[in-house]
Image (cartoon, grey):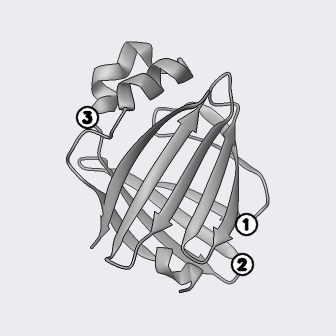
Amino acid sequence: MSIDLFRGKWKQGEEMPENFEAFMDATGVYKDKRDQVSKIRFITDFDNDGDKWVCKISVEGMPEPKVYIYKFNEAYSSTDLMGTTFTCVVTKLTDNKIQETITEWSDSEVITTREVHDDGTMTVVTSCKGVSFSSKFAKF
């Protein structure tokens, strides 16, 4: 397997991510937008140009995707879809698994792992303060 497995478009499943409410409570963010945020289902599009990776995040009805450009193991700063600032370092753990370490978004570090499986799905697990939620994506 190769890190190239991440390339392409991935659509989040329609089901509510497992343990999402507890995770949002742990992060303390978006209390006033919780209902809105819980209904968002992401489309993630990965591509690379040499050692630079481009991740485009969008949701249905959003006119333009949010674009993040990064290199593995190098910090970058940006804003999320709601305008909250963060700093992130993306690390390749294995050919089919990456980790995003996010700071300055919550009062605690947030860790997201993305793992691509042989069946063309990707599991995304996001953790903060010992509380995790998981969601499934399918390549399309």
- Residue displayed at 68% across by 33% down: 109
Image coordinates of residue 50 in percent, x first then y, are: 68, 84
Q: Can you say which quadrant of the picture contains the C terminus?
A: bottom left
Q: Vertically, is 29 above or below 140? A: above
Packing grade of label 3 (10 A; few <14, some 14-19, many >=20) is few
Q: Amino acid at mark 2?
A: Asp
Q: Which residue is label 3 attached to? A: 39
Query: Can residue 13 be seen in the rendering of this structure?
Result: yes
* Mark 1: amino acid: Phe
Place of residue 61 in the rendered image (x, y in percent of width and height, measured from the top left): 24, 47
Closer to the chain start, of discs 3 and 2, is 3
The residue at the point 35 percent across, 65 percent down is 10
Helix, strand, or loop for circle 3? loop
- Crowdedness of circle 2 by 10 Å Cα count: few (<14), some, many (20+)? few
- Compute the Cα span from label 3 to label 2: 34 Å
Of pointers 3 and 1, the one earlier in the residue sequence: 3
> Residue at label 1?
72
Residue linked to disc 2: 51
Task: Depth check: give the residue in front, 122 or 77.
Answer: 122
Label 1 residue SS: loop
Task: Name the outermost residue toward the top.
Answer: 32
Q: Residues within 10 Å of mark 1 (few under 14, many from 20)?
A: some
Q: Quick one: label 2 or label 1, which is nearer the N terminus?
A: 2
Real-space Cα distance between discs 3 and 1?
Answer: 30 Å
Residue at screen point 53% across, 17% down = 28
The residues tagged by marks 2 and 1 sit, at their Cα atoms, a distance apart of: 8 Å
Q: Are marks 3 and 2 in contact (CB under 8 Å)?
A: no
